[in-house]
Image (tube, coloured by chain):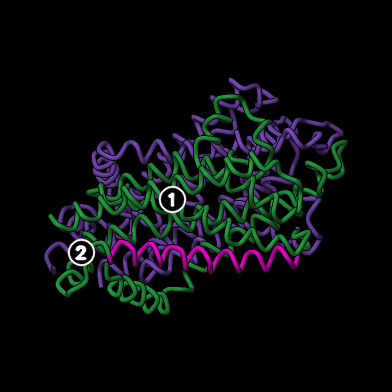
Chain colours: A purple, B green
Amino acid sequence: MAVGRGLRSLPLPSGFGAAHLIERNLRHHRRHWIIMLSGFFEPLVYLLGIGYGVGSLVPGIHLSGGRTVTYAVFVAPAMMASAAMNGAVYETSHNFFYKLRHQKIYDAALSTPLGVGDVALGEIGWALIRGSIYALGFVVIMTVLGLAASPWVVLALPAAVLLGFTFASVGVATTTFVRNWQDFDLVQLFLLPLFLFSATFTPLSLYPPALQVIIELTPLYHGVDLIRGLSTGILGPGLLVDVLYLALLSTIALVIAGARLRFLLLK
Amino acid sequence: MSLGGAAVVLERDLLNYRRTWRGSLIVSFISPVLFLAAMGLGLGSLISHGQHRLVEGVPYLDYLAPGLLAATAMQTAALESMYPILAKMMWDKIYDSILATPVQVREVFLGEIAWLVVRVAIVTVAFFAVMVLFSAVHSPLGLLAVPLTILTGLAFGAPFFAYTANQRNDTGFAALNRFVVIPLFLLAGTFFPIANLPLVFQVFAWVTPLAHGVALVRAATLASPIAPLAAAVHLTVLLGYSGVGIGLGLRGFERRLRE
């Protein structure tokens, strides 16, 4: 274990090391493409069931700026944000935990010139790729179905990538603290309210004021707000706050993830 | 036919549950309550402020709650009949140990069916109590919703047992969950009338048990009139899926566990 220790504990990623880990994940998933596909299918079914199905019961949603849109136009960007979140979370929760604690592939990776920074960036990068593929699919579908009300929707894709990056970083950081599979139930307990209450299905103004404050502190809300602003073309300084929030949270999570992985893999 | 072995298998599951109930409670009880709050209260206010003040004559929360009840039975059945069963077959090899005793394969299967019913019943009673708190149960006859919901769970769980007995790894579970369970949750009458869907999805909803379970459970909790013929069809579908599922599941268990 002592051999190459100095190399492994390099605090910064060494060149393109992370790319090797991404390639490993890509090769692994070639045999599990159906699972990749199914992760995209889920928010799509939500779009159909909630956007159109429940939307058939909702007369219309009033947005700021006095515009009224159909419920499907309102819900679609939220589903896109959820898809980006899910893609990133699937990869950095159970999959990452399995590789870290059971398969121990990072121990193998560290016996090569790869460092801990490469492992962290590789996993986050891979989760980001998965989340971005889902988000790209969503932009296409929203455009085809006429749910993208503004040309600004092209910027919804980088926005979803940023959101995916945030959740991938937070996911890796969180999973380093997970002790066993049961702990993921707690993760689920956190994710489901995020999905349901981040102004996903109803405008923020409909929640009780105290709940609104809490919601505004959580990450998915800012992702939804940002992507919805871009897809409906209702822009404002609030979107910059969303971007800053997500960038700041990603940075903090990235620092924690790096420190924790160094602790776990080099101890 | 001696069934003493089935009781022992059930007892093992109950003892095990004493250590794991917290996690399963989160998944199977807290999620429908959160859905009820987010959709019933939040979305419900949008719906009842609009031109259609009610959905099929009742507030949206009351319409949604029985749908969530039946759908929760499906999800709990899915949860119990896939990973835990394959784990006992393949990964932890619990059944190998059990079958080294005088317990028969058929008793293992019936014990697991009994446990499935118990698990669904626990969640059903808990969520039903929440519905009573939300005043979503309109008549004492609404209690009929409890056995009907449990039957809905069995109509999914039994065929899923048969499916699991044929799996060699867990890839098939993600596919079944994402391509069948989640679409049904969203499209089979839980959140909105099935008639509002395009025809192809209506067909998909009605050939599977959930739509029938939702129709019966909703009629029970809302005390709404239901045509005897319709009720008979719904009940037949649920009993049919349960019966065929138990038959296929038993065969699947026999084949798999004798390997």
Q: What secondary structure is marked by label 2?
A: helix
**Quadrant of the image for the N terminus of chain A?**
bottom left
Residue type, mark 2 in image = Gly
> Which residue is painted at 65% across and 64% down in the image?
B128
Q: Residues within 10 Å of mark 2 (few under 14, many from 20)?
A: few
Q: Is residue B49 magenta?
A: no
Q: Are marks 1 and 2 on the same chain?
A: no
Residue type, mark 1 in image = Ser
**Quadrant of the image for the C terminus of chain A?**
bottom left
* Image height of A134 relative to A175, above or below: above
Q: Is residue B19 visible?
A: yes
Closer to the camera, B141 or A173? B141
> Which residue is painted at 57% across and 56% down in the image?
B149
Identify the residue position indicated by label 1 in the image: B242
Closer to the camera, B209 or B61? B209
Closer to the camera, A221 or B91? B91
Q: Which residues are magenta?
A: B107-134
Q: What secondary structure is marked by label 1?
A: helix
> Which residue is painted at 15% across and 62% down in the image?
A4
* Image height of A138 relative to A24, above or below: above
> Which residue is painted at 75% across and 64% down in the image?
B140
Q: Disc count in the image?
A: 2
